[in-house]
Image (cartoon, grey):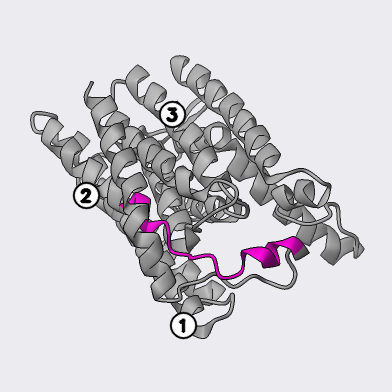
Amino acid sequence: MQIALIAFVAFAISALSGHWLIPALRKLNFGQSILEIGPSWHKNKEGTPTMGGIMFVIGILAASILAFFFLADAPATEKIKYGSGLIMALGYGLLGFIDDYTKVVRKQNEGLTAKQKLIGQVLLAVMFLAGLYLSGTLSTVLVIPFIGQLDIGFFYYPLAVFIIVGASNAVNLTDGIDGLCSSVTFVCACGFIVMSAILEHTSMSFMAAALAGGCAGYFLWNCYPARVFMGDTGSLFLGGMVCALAFGLNIPMILLFAGIVYVIETLSDIIQIGSYKIRKKRVFKMAPIHHHFEMSGWSEWKIVIVFCLVGLCGALISILAVTMI
């Protein structure tokens, strides 16, 4: 009942906030600029309000406050993991907000430089890991799904930073068509609810429920045709939340399956860039891969449904892996 209540609070606040936030964004002329290199029909989306991720950030934050009340008698480690993860996600969301605001002010699809973003992401990841380490809740034992466990000592920390930064950018890449990132993340969050229950991590169950509810509420406004875009404000925040869940359960490598869509999106981008640099040929019509299917004639709804089904398969594999730990 507590998990359901947290999910409902996040859903309701995220969904209802659209009634005032979207008109406010329009009034401020916070419209999205569309790159010329994108699909030509995306030009029709020019001017759609961006920074809509604020909707689910508010919803998830409100649900998280409720979760802390439910965690009053929980061990300190549970509270630390929840609080540290939420702070990291908010930090990533703030970084995305700065990027979005810069884009809006310049009226072009450019924000922070890649170097500025990377530095910010690395610093936030290090702060998150430092917080877990100082609280004694961080283990250097790497759990590899379906294989086993391996204590890699110091090397765990740079690997962890790489996973957090990589995963947050992967979620950001997935935000390319209406409803895709929010729906895929909803499926991922539902998988984490089950995994958290199996591993008896109450705090992570609450966090996953808040994430699922927030994504569902936002999806009502972002499904095709989108009335608002989440912007980097939203996608980087979601990336931070997904990473917080994986590290909160002490199985960051589970993101290979739980975040399978994010992995595929990133790999498609790497393959496309690598192939063009080496062979001067493109593998896909456009990358990330959701644009390839879009250029192949798939509707945005079809892409969302198929990618969610792929994400569901990944979530089920993740749940199976967790039962074997």
- Residue annotated with mark 2: 134
Q: Nearer the viewer, mark 3 or mark 1?
A: 1
The magenta region covers: 41-57
Look at the image and say whether residue 48 sits in the magenta stretch.
yes
For mark 3, give the secondary structure.
helix
For mark 1, give the secondary structure.
helix
Place of residue 57 in the rendered image (x, y in percent of width and height, measured from the top left): 33, 52
- Residue annotated with mark 1: 105
Name the residue located 60 percent from the left edge and 25 percent from the top edge.
Answer: 313
Q: Nearer the viewer, mark 3 or mark 2?
A: 3
Residue 190, numbered circle: 3
Name the residue located 77 percent from the left edge and 46 percent from the top edge.
Answer: 293
Mark 1: amino acid = Val
Name the residue located 21 percent from the left edge and 25 percent from the top edge.
Answer: 2
Place of residue 63 in the rendered image (x, y in percent of width and height, measured from the top left): 24, 41
Place of residue 246 in the rendered image (x, y in percent of width and height, measured from the top left): 41, 37
Q: Earlier in the sequence, mark 3 or mark 2?
A: 2
Mark 3: amino acid = Cys
In which quadrant of the rendered view does residue 96 lie?
bottom left
Identify the residue at the far left of this view: 73
Between the C-alphas of marks 3 and 2, the distance is 30 Å
> Is residue 138 visible to us here?
no
Q: Is residue 243 above or below residue 166?
A: above
Look at the image and say whether residue 70 sits in the magenta stretch.
no
> Is residue 235 visible to us here?
yes
Between the C-alphas of marks 2 and 1, the distance is 40 Å
Give whichever of 56, 74 is nearer the camera.
56
Q: Residues within 10 Å of mark 1 (few under 14, many from 20)?
A: few
Mark 2: amino acid = Leu
Q: Earlier in the sequence, mark 2 or mark 1?
A: 1
